[in-house]
Amino acid sequence: MKRTYHVPMVQITQHEVPRGMFPDMTGVEHWMLDLPTTRLHVAFAGDPHAQPLILLHGFPQNWWEWREVIAPLAQHYWVIVPDLRGAGWSDAPRQGYSAEHHARDIIALMDVMSIKRAALVTHDYGALIGYHLTDTRAPRFTHHIAMSAPPPALTTHSRWLGETWRSWYQIIMWLPGLGPALLSGGKQRFATHLLEAYSAYPEVWSATDRAMFLTPLKRAANARAMSKVHRHLIHPETRRRMRNARTDQRVSVPTTLLVGELDPLVGAMVRHGYTEGRDPNVSVKVVPDASHYVVDDQSVSVATIITTTLSTAQERTPDLATTQ
């Protein structure tokens, strides 16, 4: 089944994903969207007339990262969950993995769905894309909730720099040959380690969860894409956050930073590399008993924080409810 949308200058074809391709989730629809920029797999849930809420996953995960929060969020929002380019079941083009390329995908998705403004919830490198979107397309977003990512403006400090060894895997992922080979090869021990070593509760992932995360990474194109994400997005954007601190740059969209209490690196960044209150548009919330994979470790708490934060923001600025 397919549907065709007509937007200015562009014809968009929407292909329904075959039934059984993903685990059943009540109220969730899956579509492949041929955007002007690339083809994305997108999951949708909730009322299309409600406030749009876009969820962007991190590495080495995909849309399935949000599985436990989609249903509670869909009670209040139109929830839109794409696989980012090169991840999950979206296309993995040979080039185009900068923050700007990812941002163009999200804006194209919003345009196709006739979304003028949306709230944004992001994790890991998805948060770096979120920062770029809110820096460069601020009028399109009402609020940004970023998880497990460097603060919007990050100052250097020996106390968090001393924890950077925990990101040793990024050096491997940066290498064009070695990173993809280890990510996709054999029993995927490297990819499995990336999930287990940075979670407060590795046992939270079922066999289905692990398969949903690891299976797409077996594809050579996806593994190469994730290496390019590290080279062209994660490293450049982290450096940019540090430059923002030196120039005292502030965010344009209200931003809430969620940090796992047990996250050794990002927690240290927030404690020692960011001064809360230096930017009135940024607030920090610590999620107890969670590490890097905040959503997986504490999904109930995260869903509550998202709903409470966005509803509070809407009460302060009622016109944010009119987003389409």
Image (cartoon, rainbow, N blue to C red):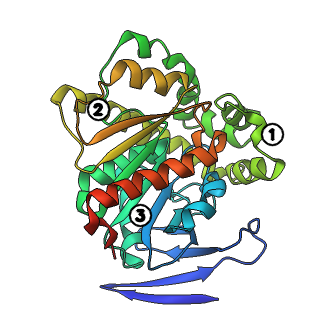
Mark pair 3, 2: CA separation? 25 Å
Q: SS class of the residue under badge 3? A: helix
**Residue at left offset 56%, top offset 71%:** 44
Q: Residues within 10 Å of mark 3 (few under 14, many from 20)?
A: many
Placement of 40 over or under 156, stated as above or below: below
Q: Quadrant of the C terminus?
A: bottom left
* Mark before the other along the chain sequence, 1 or 2: 2
Which label number is shown at residue 218? none
Q: Amino acid at mark 1?
A: Gly
The amino acid type of the residue labelled 2 equals Ala
How far, Cα to Cα, is label 1 from label 3? 32 Å
Q: Position of residue 294 (x, y in %)?
A: 58, 39
Q: Quadrant of the N terminus?
A: bottom right
- The residue singled out by tag 2 in the image is 153
Give the quadrant of residue 140: bottom left
Q: Amino acid at mark 3?
A: Asp
Q: Which residue is mark 1?
A: 186
Query: Could you tell me which residue is drawn at 27 percent across and 56 percent down?
Result: 316
Q: Earlier in the sequence, mark 1 or mark 3?
A: 3
Would you say residue 55 is visible in this rendering? Answer: yes
Query: Residue under circle 3?
Result: 105
Q: Nearer the viewer, mark 3 or mark 2?
A: 2
Rendered residue at 49%/19% (across/down): 164
Crowding at dot 1, Cα within 10 Å, few <14 / some 14-19 / many 20+, comes out as: few
User: For residue 195, which quarter of the picture?
Assistant: top right
Question: Which picture quadrant has residue 112?
Answer: bottom left
- Is residue 137 in sight in this rendering? no
Label 2 CA crowd tier, 10 Å (few <14, some 14–19, many 20+): many
